[in-house]
Image (spheres, rainbow, N blue to C red):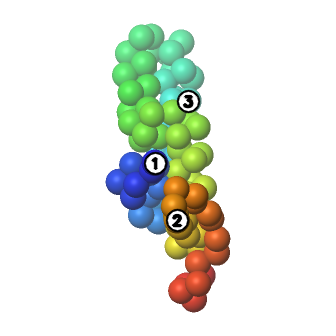
Amino acid sequence: MLTEESTFASASVPRHLARGALGFGALIAALALLPVTGPLSLLLAPVGVVALRGCPTCWAIGLVQTISRGRLRRTCVDGVCTLAAADDGVR
């Protein structure tokens, strides 16, 4: 069961996209600079992994969660959970 603390979502979509640009940029640079700087460029790989919070798939899941935050509500009754549009008027 996911809680607010265990999701991959960011505080805002621009912040999440910035994390993605940093993460993917660092991973691409680590590989692209390998012929120029040798193994030293691989030090950028951990930066990319941390920025993406583990992996590109984790980042993509977080993007979907960030976009849908506040638009969808999950309710659970007697062990049965449903997902529905939020009724609080915030869109």
Give the camera-side residue of 27 and 82: 82
Mark 2 and 1 residues: CB-CB less than 8 Å, in contact?
no
User: Considering only order in the chain, which callout, 2 or 3, is on the residue closer to the N terminus?
Assistant: 3
Report which quarter residue 68 is drawn in.
bottom right
* Residue under the image location 43 percent in, 25 percent down: 45
Q: What type is the residue that disc 1 sits on? A: Met
* Above or below: residue 15 compared with residue 24: below
Give the camera-side residue of 59 and 69: 69
Mark 3 and 1 residues: CB-CB less than 8 Å, in contact?
no
Quadrant that contains the C terminus: bottom right
Mark 1 — residue?
A: 1
Residue 37 position within the rendered picture, expressed as x and y whole percent measured from the top left: 44, 15
Q: How many marks?
A: 3
Q: What type is the residue that disc 2 sits on? A: Val
Q: Secondary structure at mark 2?
A: strand
Q: Secondary structure at mark 1?
A: loop
Mark 3 vs mark 2, foreground winner is 2
User: Considering only order in the chain, which callout, 1 or 3, is on the residue closer to the N terminus?
Assistant: 1
Real-space CA distance between mark 2 and mark 1, rounded to the nearest whole angstrom = 14 Å
Give the camera-side residue of 87 and 48: 87
The label number, if any, that marks residue 28 in the structure image: 3
Report which quarter residue 47 is drawn in.
top left
Residue 27 position within the rendered picture, expressed as x and y whole percent measured from the top left: 51, 30
The label number, if any, that marks residue 77 in the structure image: 2
